[in-house]
Amino acid sequence: MQTLTQRAEVRAFTTAARAAGQRIGFVPTMGALHAGHLDLVRRAVETCDVVVASIFVNPRQFNNIADLAAYPRVVEEDSALLAAAGCTALFLPEAAEMYPAPPVVSISFGPLEAVLEGAHRPGHFAGVGLVVAKLLHLVAPHAAWFGQKDLQQCAVIRALVRDLDFEVALEVAPTVRETDGLAMSSRNRRLTPAERAVAPTLYRALDAARTALLRGATVAEAEAEGRAVIAAEPAFRAEYFAVVDAHSLQAPDPAAGLPPTETAVVVAAHLGAVRLIDNVVLPPAVAGI
Ligand code: PAF
């Protein structure tokens, strides 16, 4: 696996691959890789000739400076994992390489960022949009992989690609979970053993709401059941817990039952110093029942 640190290098690398008729897959990350990231790489390797992963802890998407400082950085370990997973190249730029001058362009996602993560992390999706747009320009992949755990991120990137005519196929892979249900996340490694023990409560809460919807409860009742599971665990401070449309992220009628469109249950909660997010999506076939 080659490690490329300059924008010009990654451009030259993928331009040559394209010219040679190779299909290029891309997995953007912020490092501290876990089985969820490696699953994205595995999927890319399955269908592409060349797979580029990036590791860049993008300062512009952190609205909380302490969160940016605490974000785990384990580049050597990550690099070995990517090479073993079959990655062809790692793009590993410094912040000054990605942003040689303070950017003046700002991407806004309107209603998609007015809710959930966007409402609690002002500027977060502007930062994600900017860096993903730059990475897609630099790597120019045929396909790029993202994890469903960041459901709202998937929605804004889908809008970015559609509205700005990026020629890339977006692939969203299901969330990879620990055996106790906890969604894999780079932030999990910051949990204390006691916090780690109660962390799967989030998934139990999502599952309770999903089960309630499937047995015919209203949206409001399902949300109440899920919230009660989190409230019973005092270590958590919930930020939001909601049933939403999986694509528009807007709230359905709380007094109605399971909506006929693809529906998600989403949560964000603080556990000690760590903020965790998770979601479950009810597939349309089920949601249509
Ligand atoms: O999901 C992430 O790790 C980041 O938000 C991404 C897509 C790499 C952009 O910095």
Image: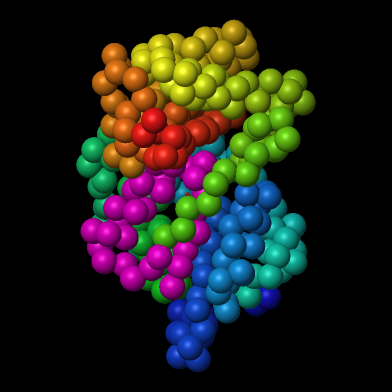
Q: Is residue 130 left or right of residue 109?
A: right
Residue at x 26%, y 46% (from the top left corner): 109
Image position of 236 with respect to 25: above or below: above
Residue 267, percent across and down?
48, 27
Taking the view exactly as shown, the residue that stands out farthest to the bottom is 20
Viewer can see residue 106: yes
Residue 203, percent across and down?
59, 27
Marker count (numbered): 0
Q: Quadrant of the C terminus?
A: top left
- Which quarter of the figure has residue 75? bottom right
Q: In this view, does 55 lie to the left or right of 38?
A: left
Q: Quadrant of the N terminus?
A: bottom right
User: Does 91 appear in magenta?
Assistant: no
Taking the view exactly as shown, the residue that stands out farthest to the front is 289
Q: What stretch is highlighted in magenta?
A: 142-169
User: Does 164 appear in magenta?
Assistant: yes
Residue at x 45%, y 29% (from the top left corner): 266
Q: Is residue 280 left or right of residue 119?
A: right
> Looking at this view, is 274 or 5 the one in front?
274
Residue at x 65%, y 32% (from the top left corner): 182
Image position of 10 with respect to 80: above or below: below
- Which quarter of the figure has residue 83? bottom right
Q: In this view, does 114 lie to the left or right of 72?
A: left
